[in-house]
Image (cartoon, rainbow, N blue to C red):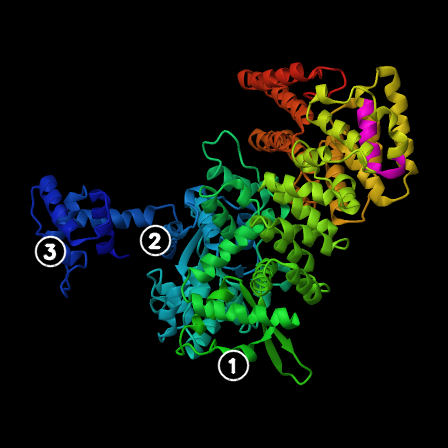
């Protein structure tokens, strides 16, 4: 028991602050005099608190005065009190545990503050990642002793560690003591004579030499000490020193596996992790390191979920805005891109500077990333040289570059030969480039270097082709010749089209469409509908020319219509269909279907022209047939409804093509779950159609919705996650209503659990996405459900505001929301 140290702690407690500066000693001297009327000089206090070197112990007189300042009669009274407290205390908490708690607080405070300052998005606006926090909690309670968190730079590794530390109840209750240490400090270990565990404990102010039975003492700890070595990739060591450090981390994981109550977490980028992995001889003590855990970003943690991205958008670009930007309204490729947190940061930082139309293009985000991490970062020329070499090789041979070949061009392996070494490793750490070892039969190997992200690769290739050929027919022919058999070809066409659209090259775009058809029609029409959101006037200028081609017309109208924009893109296309078109009558049915969805009842063709169009529709398009049945069922008189529904079921059964069946289902789906007259059509949604990823995802979401409403069993967290993963598999032009159904299912699930906050968030997402897509009929029904539910829960004013809004929509459209047909509040 160190009684002098305990007295110092008692003095600091009475003083109200830690004595951290020499000026504190002067203030303390004055306070001691005011309290005890006895004087201790500031110089004496500076010696006592270690600001002045001294070999002598404090005098008895000094100890007596300080004891009286702390409320005791004299020094001996203080001593006796401490001994008595020690012997009579019911607590058996080891002194080592208290020391770890005390010393770790200052270390963690400094490192957490550093993480918060470095956060690209203000830390208070970032999001807790509950899935990852549960991963850490599981690790702490598991029989594993080391955990690797691996991801590219800007993936949010340090941010999520900070959130876990600040919000973990076991940390607050001192059952788990994380100790966050910046990996850059390992460089001190590399140049020391200490063992790795001795060095690590010294970071917490514990001299392992003075505790010869440290392993026994660790067994007595009432909780777990978790050392977190953050940002291993920031090490600048090379050669023997780097090897010593990486071996040391392996030894640390082995040491912890043989002791009690100690665990290790490292965060790292992939390239550094692969270097460390070569030294691991006991991988069984590690968690989360199997290669199957790594995704295409070379990360063993998932990217941001839709909920997490939406929360960050609400905390930033949506803050104090009347209209929210919904993550679901962004194109799927953009959603996928900004699930990488650094890309989301770029999106948010650009959002206030440019309009949404430009931001809806994923290419702009990719280019902004390349600009910031290559051309506006350190070593821009060296990075550009390396990337150009990789792009040139891919352009000529569609292959990666052998690292030995790259070394001949640029000294990427020599740290002292210019900046290429640092430039190369910076590109590697951010996942812009990647390495792969390829082994030969003779036990040798070569390292292949490639661009590590398909979007970056496609962007660079597109820019190099345009630089060489310009936006011309030569560019189109060169692209077809070089890449028509390459997997990036469809995406490359889309990028070239998008660049031409942004530069308003109308003649080039017309040529591009005709020269790339018909094999790439889906990619081009998807890109076209996305471009509409960026420049409506150019879209209108191109559209009449494009619709001259019957294949394009059929794709835009029937095969791959933009059902996400029935009041915008799709309606504009339908308006351009000419009477001489073979799809003119189909367009009339589709237009009235859009008007019904948009509650534009007065615009619906009252001549009953579409009533008589069924024979043509039956012959040509199951999608149009589905729309025709929806119109007829909705406007039918009660005694005719049953027969029309029966005819619809018979029609569906007669369809032999899986694709055609899916098209019919997509048409009726928006009505089946809101209008009771359509309920018998739920039977056609049960059949699994597993032809495409879109169909599988849609079937899965419909199944989960119907199963939930039937059995009333709430979703598990994994089920919520799986449901949102399905959103990303949906077709870019026809995803919104399926997402609305998924969000409605999640809302109901949360409601069953009495989680009203998340239930409200999900149904709000569904309602707002209805508004964005033009589904006013479905928006009206869901708003009424929400209003009625809130009123039943006692939120009368809030609920009444929603009900009043639906009453207004009902009155203007003539569609009676309180009709016996509509689902409300059930």
Circle 1 or circle 3, nearest the eye: 1
* Residues at discs 1 and 3 in contact (Cβ within 8 Å): no
Horizontal side, residue 608 vs residue 450: left or right: right
Read off the residue under disc 1.
408
- Give whichever of discs 2 and 3 has the lower sequence position: 3
Residue occupying image coordinates x 48% and y 77%: 410
Which dot, 2 or 3, sits closer to the camera?
2
Instruction: Decide whether residue 163 is among the magenta residues.
Output: no
Residue under label 2 = 110
Where does residue 230 sit, x and y in percent of width and height? 44, 59
Q: How far across and down, in percent of the image, does residue 364 sit?
A: 53, 51
Q: Report the span colored magenta.
A: 618-633
Q: Is residue 718 visible?
A: no
Q: In this rendering, would 770 be left or right of 406?
A: right
- Circle 2 crowding by C-alpha within 10 Å: few under 14, some 14–19, many from 20: few
Q: Earlier in the sequence, mark 2 or mark 1?
A: 2
Position of the C terminus, as image quadrant, is top right
Nearer to me, 198 or 192: 192
Image point 21% across, 55% down: which residue? 4
Q: Please state the horizontal and vertical placement of residue 740, each as a whole percent of the image.
A: 67, 34
- Circle 3 sits on which residue? 44
């Amino acid at each position: 028991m160190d009684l002098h140290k305990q007295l110092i702690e008692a003095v600091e407690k009475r003083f109200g602050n830690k004595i951290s500066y020499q000026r504190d000693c002067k203030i303390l001297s004055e306070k001691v005099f005011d309290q005890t009327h006895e004087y201790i000089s500031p110089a004496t206090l500076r010696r006592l608190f270690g600001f002045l070197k001294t070999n002598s112990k404090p005098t008895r007189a000094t100890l007596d005065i300080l004891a009286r300042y702390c409320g005791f009669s004299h020094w001996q009274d203080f001593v006796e009190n401490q001994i008595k407290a020690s012997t009579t205390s019911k607590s058996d908490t080891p002194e080592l545990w208290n020391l770890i708690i005390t010393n770790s607080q200052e270390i963690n405070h400094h490192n957490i503050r550093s993480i918060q300052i470095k956060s690209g998005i203000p830390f208070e606006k970032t999001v807790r990642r509950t899935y990852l926090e549960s991963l850490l909690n599981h690790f702490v309670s598991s029989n594993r002793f080391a955990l690797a968190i691996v991801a590219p730079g800007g993936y949010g590794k340090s941010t999520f560690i900070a959130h876990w530390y600040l919000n973990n109840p076991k940390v607050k209750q001192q059952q788990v003591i994380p100790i966050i240490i910046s990996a850059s400090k390992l460089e001190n270990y590399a140049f020391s004579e200490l063992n790795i565990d001795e060095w690590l404990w010294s970071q917490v102010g514990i001299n392992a030499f003075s505790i010869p039975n440290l392993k026994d003492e660790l067994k007595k700890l009432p909780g777990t000490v978790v050392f977190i070595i953050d940002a291993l990739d920031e090490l600048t060591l090379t050669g023997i020193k780097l090897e010593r450090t990486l071996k040391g981390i392996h030894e640390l994981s082995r040491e912890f596996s043989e002791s009690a109550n100690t665990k290790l977490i490292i965060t790292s980028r992939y390239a550094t992790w692969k270097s460390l992995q070569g030294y691991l001889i006991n991988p069984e003590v590690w968690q989360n390191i199997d290669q199957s855990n790594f995704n295409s970003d070379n990360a063993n943690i998932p990217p941001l979920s839709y909920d997490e991205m939406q929360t960050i958008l609400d905390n930033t670009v949506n803050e104090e805005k009347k209209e929210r930007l919904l993550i679901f309204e962004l194109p799927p490729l953009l959603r996928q891109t900004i699930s990488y947190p650094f890309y989301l940061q770029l999106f948010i930082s650009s959002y206030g500077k440019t309009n949404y139309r430009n931001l809806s293009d994923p290419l702009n985000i990719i280019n902004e990333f390349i600009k910031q991490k290559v051309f506006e970062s350190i070593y821009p020329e060296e990075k550009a040289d390396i990337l150009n070499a990789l792009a040139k090789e891919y352009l000529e041979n569609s292959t990666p570059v052998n690292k030995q070949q790259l070394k001949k061009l640029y000294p990427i392996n020599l740290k002292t030969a210019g900046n290429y070494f640092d430039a190369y490793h910076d590109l590697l750490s951010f996942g812009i480039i990647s390495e792969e070892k390829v082994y030969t039969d003779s036990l040798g190997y070569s390292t292949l270097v490639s661009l590590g992200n398909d979007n970056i690769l496609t962007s660079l290739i597109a820019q190099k082709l345009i630089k060489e050929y310009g936006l011309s027919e030569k560019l189109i022919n060169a692209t077809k010749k070089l890449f028509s058999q390459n997997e990036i070809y469809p995406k490359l066409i889309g990028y070239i089209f998008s660049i031409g659209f942004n530069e308003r090259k109308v003649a080039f775009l017309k040529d591009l469409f005709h020269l790339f058809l018909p094999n790439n029609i889906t990619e081009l029409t998807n890109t076209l509908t996305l471009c509409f959101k960026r420049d409506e006037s150019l879209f209108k200028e191109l559209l009449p020319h494009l619709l001259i081609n019957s294949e394009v017309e059929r794709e835009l109208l029937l095969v791959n219509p933009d059902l996400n924009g029935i009041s915008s893109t799709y309606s504009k296309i339908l308006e351009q269909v000419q009477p001489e078109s073979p799809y003119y009558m189909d367009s009339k049915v589709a237009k009235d279907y859009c008007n019904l969805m948009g509650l534009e009842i007065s615009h619906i063709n009252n001549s009953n022209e579409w009533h008589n169009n069924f024979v043509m529709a039956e012959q040509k398009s199951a999608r149009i047939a589905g729309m025709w049945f929806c119109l007829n069922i909705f406007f039918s008189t009660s005694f005719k409804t049953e027969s029309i529904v029966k005819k619809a079921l018979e029609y569906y059964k007669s369809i032999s093509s899986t694709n055609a069946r899916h098209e019919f289902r997509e048409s009726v789906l928006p009505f089946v779950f809101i209008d009771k007259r359509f309920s018998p059509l739920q039977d056609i949604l049960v059949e699994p159609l597993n032809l495409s990823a879109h169909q599988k995802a849609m079937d899965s979401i419909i199944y989960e919705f119907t199963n939930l409403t039937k059995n009333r069993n709430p979703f598990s967290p994994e089920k919520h996650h799986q449901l949102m993963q399905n959103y990303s598999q949906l077709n870019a032009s026809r995803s919104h209503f399926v997402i609305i159904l998924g969000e409605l299912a999640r809302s109901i699930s949360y409601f069953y659990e009495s989680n009203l906050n998340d239930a409200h968030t999900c149904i709000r997402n569904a309602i707002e996405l209805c508004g964005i897509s033009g589904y006013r009929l479905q928006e009206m029904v869901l708003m009424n459900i929400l209003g009625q539910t809130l009123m039943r829960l006692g939120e009368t004013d809030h609920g009444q505001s929603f009900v009043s809004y639906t009453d207004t929509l009902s009155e203007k459209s003539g569609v009676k929301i309180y009709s016996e047909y509509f689902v409300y509040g059930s």
